[in-house]
């Protein structure tokens, strides 16, 4: 006689771990915040360690601190820089994660960030031989940090997969940042510090104004409604033009590198899964 016993009833179900129970976007945001705090502590102990965290073209081209093309993706120049990038990652990353899945999303995010760092290094080197190249691409001795390259990769992917879907680009903070650095050469250091503080406060007000139920209040953020295909153009081209005259603290070449990864992978997915992409565009509007 054969006796069957369902052993599954006696097996305790394992609770999902802390990271498993959360979206990958949430995990990436947590990792970015933790890395930011950790690197701040390290820099507080040894300020020179910035050369081992931030990507610096001259170091990488000489074969030193090559790992910074990765560590720089998880470091930010300040709390405001971190906040803006994580704010963008929350909205763009959540959508991309639902479309391509957790594993693909993780690899795509990391590759876009690393390629963004490599573009920053390559264009900084190339900029030595181009008029105003240091303004356009950053100097070979400049340092860069931030997840912007990876985030622009997400933007490029969505621009290909969901080109007609409309999103809001908050223009106000970009205008404030440009004005801050355009005015600095013409004012004293004390006035410049005051402008920085006022600008930072104004940017936060603009960002949170977007969530106001009052339409007039939302206008403070200067929102611009754009299709996904147009968003990367508006986010990069004007800054490149302005950067020809004013040296902005924005790594446009890193943004462009991440964007290229997003466009290429988006084109692959669109061609490989043409029917699914059509359905996706009908479902997400």
Image (cartoon, rainbow, N blue to C red):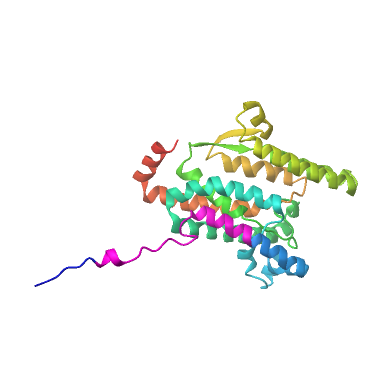
State left or right for residue 9 relative to residue 245.
left
Residue 56 in sight from this viewpoint? no
Instruction: Classify the position of the C terminus by image quarter.
Output: top left
Q: Is residue 264 above or below residue 67?
A: above
Q: In the figure, is residue 87 to the left or right of 98?
A: right
Query: Looking at the image, which is closer to me, 284 or 63?
Result: 284
Nearest to the observer: residue 6 or residue 114: 6
Task: Verify whether residue 43 appears in magenta.
Answer: no
Measuring from the top left, give residue 39's x and y in whole percent.
69, 64
- In this view, which residue lies farthest toward the left? 1
Q: Measured along the vertical axis of the image, is residue 83 above or below residue 168? A: below
Q: Position of residue 190 (x, y in %)?
A: 89, 47
Q: Residue at x 62, y 27 (%)?
A: 215
Question: Is residue 242 at all visible to an observer of this figure?
Answer: yes
Q: Residue at x 56, y 35 (%)?
A: 226
Q: How many marks?
A: 0
Please give the range of residues in magenta.
7-34
Instruction: Name the residue: 54% across, 45% down.
Output: 91
Q: Is residue 22 magenta?
A: yes
Q: Residue at x 74, y 60 (%)?
A: 142
Picture coordinates of residue 178, whole percent (x, y):
75, 42
Q: Position of residue 246 (x, y in %)?
A: 78, 46
Quadrant the N terminus occupies: bottom left
């Amino acid at each position: 006689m054969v006796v069957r016993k369902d052993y599954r009833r006696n097996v305790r179900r394992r609770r999902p771990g802390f990271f498993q129970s959360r979206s990958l976007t949430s995990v990436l945001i947590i990792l970015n915040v933790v890395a930011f705090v950790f690197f701040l502590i390290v820099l507080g102990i040894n300020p020179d360690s910035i050369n081992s965290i931030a990507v610096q073209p001259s170091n990488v081209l000489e074969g030193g601190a090559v790992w910074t093309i990765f560590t720089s993706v998880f470091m930010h120049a300040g709390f405001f820089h971190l906040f803006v990038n994580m704010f963008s990652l929350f909205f763009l990353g959540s959508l991309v994660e639902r479309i391509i899945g957790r594993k693909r999303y993780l690899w795509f995010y990391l590759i876009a960030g690393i390629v963004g760092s490599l573009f920053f290094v390559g264009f900084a080197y190339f900029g030595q031989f181009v008029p105003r190249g240091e303004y356009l691409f950053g100097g070979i001795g400049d340092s860069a940090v931030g997840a912007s390259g990876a985030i622009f990769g997400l933007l490029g992917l969505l621009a290909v997969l969901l080109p007609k879907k409309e999103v809001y680009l908050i223009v106000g903070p970009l205008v404030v940042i440009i004005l801050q650095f355009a005015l600095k050469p013409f004012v004293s250091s004390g006035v410049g510090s005051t402008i920085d503080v006022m600008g930072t406060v104004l940017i936060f007000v603009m960002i949170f104004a977007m969530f106001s139920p009052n339409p007039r209040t939302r206008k403070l953020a200067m929102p611009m409604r754009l299709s996904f295909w147009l968003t990367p153009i508006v986010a990069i081209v004007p800054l490149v033009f302005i950067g020809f005259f004013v040296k902005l603290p924005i790594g446009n070449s890193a943004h462009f590198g991440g964007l290229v990864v997003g466009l290429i992978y988006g084109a692959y997915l669109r061609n490989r899964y043409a029917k699914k992409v059509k359905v996706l565009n009908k479902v997400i509007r």
